[in-house]
Image (cartoon, coloured by chain):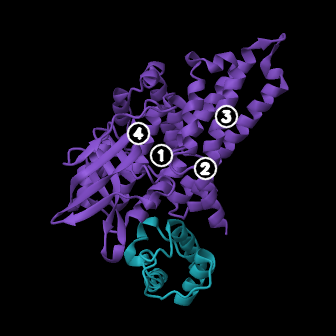
Amino acid sequence: MEFNWTKKQIELKKKVIEFASKKLNENIIEQDNLGEFPRQKWLDCASFGIQGAIIPEEYNGLDLDISSAVLLMEGLGYGCKDNGLLFSINAHIWGCEIPILHFGTDEQKNKYLPGLSKGSLIGAHGMTEPDSGSDAFSLKTTAVKKGNSYILNGRKTFITNAPTADLFISYARIPQKNHRSKISCFIVERGMGGVSVSKKIDKMGLKTSPYGDIIFEDCIVPEENLLGKEGLGQAVFNNSMAEERAFILATHVGLMERQLEECLSYSKKRIQFNKRIFKFQSISNMLADMKVRLEASRLLVYKVAWLRDQKKNAFLDSSITKLFVSESCIKNSLSAIRIYGGYGYSTEYEIERQLRDSIGSVLYSGTSEIQRNIIAELLD
Amino acid sequence: MKEAIKQYIIENIIREKVEIDLNISLLDEGIIDSLGYLKLISFLEKQYDISIDLGEIDIENFDTIIKIAKFVENKLDK
């Protein structure tokens, strides 16, 4: 396995770090307090090309391979301290762009990918329902064919970007005879009759990433907005999750790297009992563990990227990566607070927010418990 | 090949001594769930040295054991 990046890849990473550091780190504390979506920063990211990272050039994208996109996102995570913004971008790319890119008709790709790539359209991925989270395919939303349309009824909950999104990739059951149904996927536009979005749901972390419910009440979706074929819903979802599980955490690798650097710097300056706290084993051990988790996380993410670039099956590796990197991010964020002590607990130093933001990572894209189930099953 | 696929499904996914009709819809009858499909794909890739993209897993290719076997045979012919 080749571990060297090309000059072009390294250059892109440097550029995104420079861009993110200069343009994306103002007013985060205030926006986090208010739960405000940073729309201008979103557009700035799109201008850089981030939302179009994996979109082909013909649709205004950067057309990066997966490995290059992962390195770009790692750099973004290193340079940008707004984890909520990064989470919204990730949900948009892996939850909305990927399904359309992999399963969309040419008409659907032409209609939606340019806007998604430019950031003028915001995407959301609507799977979770009030009664179906981990048990995703027990969803209840229905889609009944009527003439040239499908009529959707149901509710999706905890949907990232829902309050601001223009497109909702939505999963619903098309009833068949004999009480069967086919889980299918639809591209629902905000302006379609019968779709509404609840008010923003407040949450523990990732507060600048808006989150809410999508409600379908006799929502009329034209048949040309069926994504894939009837019954392809599970394949669309699994494909999207297999990519999302690993790649959504590329930004976490960048975060952990910046976090470690900041903790190292602080521990070498902070004097207690007449010596730098770095010299106390309890602190240096924490830093050592942070480094181990960071480097192991990095390699796991790179491996999945490499497998996907080779078009190889990465089910097991995606779940391993999701489990390990998300849990590592929480541990490293907690260690960072402990290294900074009282300063780490205060909002001003932006350390506590990293822990609040990282907790979500063991819940979204499949909980750690589900990842363990998947890993165990695939080992069997 | 159909028998090998059937045996794998019985022994590793259903894990009970049952009979499965080669023409029965595995999805509609709830015989395999999404995790079961991931396991089946991993088995088919290793057993027959083929590569299967997630986008190929649709009801036309993977709904019945007969369709799965035909899909694999087409892959091998290529």
Q: Is residue A278 left or right of residue A255?
A: right
**Which residue matches tag 4?**
A50
**Which residue matches tag 1?**
A69
Colour in which chain B is drawn: cyan
Q: Quadrant of the C terminus of chain A?
A: bottom right
For mark 2, does the 10 Å Cα neighbourhood hold few (<14), some (14 to 19), or many (20 or more) residues? Answer: many
Lower sequence index among marks 1 and 4: 4
Q: Mark 1, mark 3: which one is toward the viewer?
A: 3
Colour in which chain A is drawn: purple
Chain to which mark 1 belongs: A
Pointers 3 and 4 in contact (CB under 8 A)? no
Marker disc for residue A200: none
- State how many labels appear: 4
Lower sequence index among marks 2 and 1: 1
* Residue type for callout 4: Ile
Q: Is residue A51 left or right of residue A365?
A: left
Lower sequence index among marks 3 and 4: 4
